[in-house]
Amino acid sequence: MKNNFIIINSDGSLSLVDKEFITCISGLDTPKKIGAYMLENFVKISYGKEGGSKANNLRKFWKTKKGNCVNFSEFGAFVADYHGYTAYRMGMSYEGLSEKHVIAIYEEDGRMSFTDNQDYFDNNGNWFNSFEEIRDFLCASHPGYQIKECILREYGNRIKNK
């Protein structure tokens, strides 16, 4: 078996990752574990700050342990997909604001959960039944932010042995 892997990032760029990365994500076999790992190991920073990038580069994010919502959602969706979960990334823009936000959504046994940066949400064990419920939950938890547009993309596993 090879020790390095090539990941095609969602922006089309390539990342070379090592066996240490694969070993790490192999243990993150549920969305809840992915969220716990991100909460314990990564720091959230804004676009334009050191390490905060609009580009999705899993290797850089994993090595520096800091990133923004784009990086967190890419990592969460990639790892979940690696373990066979159907994963999505939902991007949102807001009325009157230039900032945007991205989350990762996971299908777990016919139910849905999501990570918002490092935080894992399963609706306190009640789960979510649709993307609309997740969107409404986010709106209710951020009063004053009105979602103008939501874009949903299913995540596809993009890992190949080198």
Image (cartoon, rainbow, N blue to C red):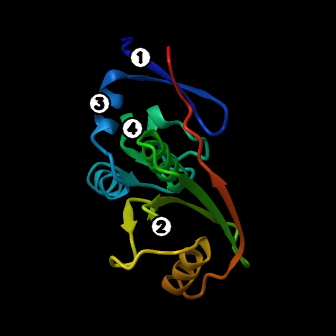
Q: Position of residue 110 (x, y in %)?
A: 48, 65
Q: Of discs 3 and 4, which sits in the foreground?
A: 3
The earlier-in-sequence mark between 4 and 1 is 1
Q: CA–CA distance between discs 1 and 3?
A: 11 Å
Q: Amino acid at mark 2?
A: Met
* Residue 24 horizontal/vertical position (percent): 29, 35
Drawn side of residue 14 relative to residue 107, left or right = right
Separation of marks 2 and 4 at Cα, in angstroms = 25 Å
Q: CA distance from mark 3 to mark 4?
A: 13 Å
Crowd band around label 1 with a 10 angstrom C-alpha radius: few (<14), some (14–19), many (20+) = some
| Residue depicted at x 29% and y 51% | 37
Is label 2 or label 4 in front?
2
Residue matched to label 4? 62
- Distance (Cα) linking label 4 and label 1: 15 Å
Q: Earlier in the sequence, mark 1 or mark 2?
A: 1
The tag on residue 23 is: 3
The quadrant in which residue 109 appears is bottom left
Mark 2 vs 3: CB contact within 8 A: no
Label 3's element? helix
Marks 1 and 2: CB-CB under 8 Å?
Answer: no
Disc 4 secondary structure class: helix
Extreme front residue here?
110
Q: Nearer the viewer, residue 21 or 95?
A: 21
Q: Is residue 141 above or below residue 68?
A: below
Q: Residues within 10 Å of mark 3 (few under 14, many from 20)?
A: few
Tell how many labels: 4
Q: Which-is-in-front pick, marks 4 and 1?
A: 1
Which residue carries the number 1 mark? 4
Residue 9 x/y as whole percent: 59, 35
Decide: few, some or many residues near mark 2? Use Cα within 10 Å; few <14, some 14-19, many ≥20: many
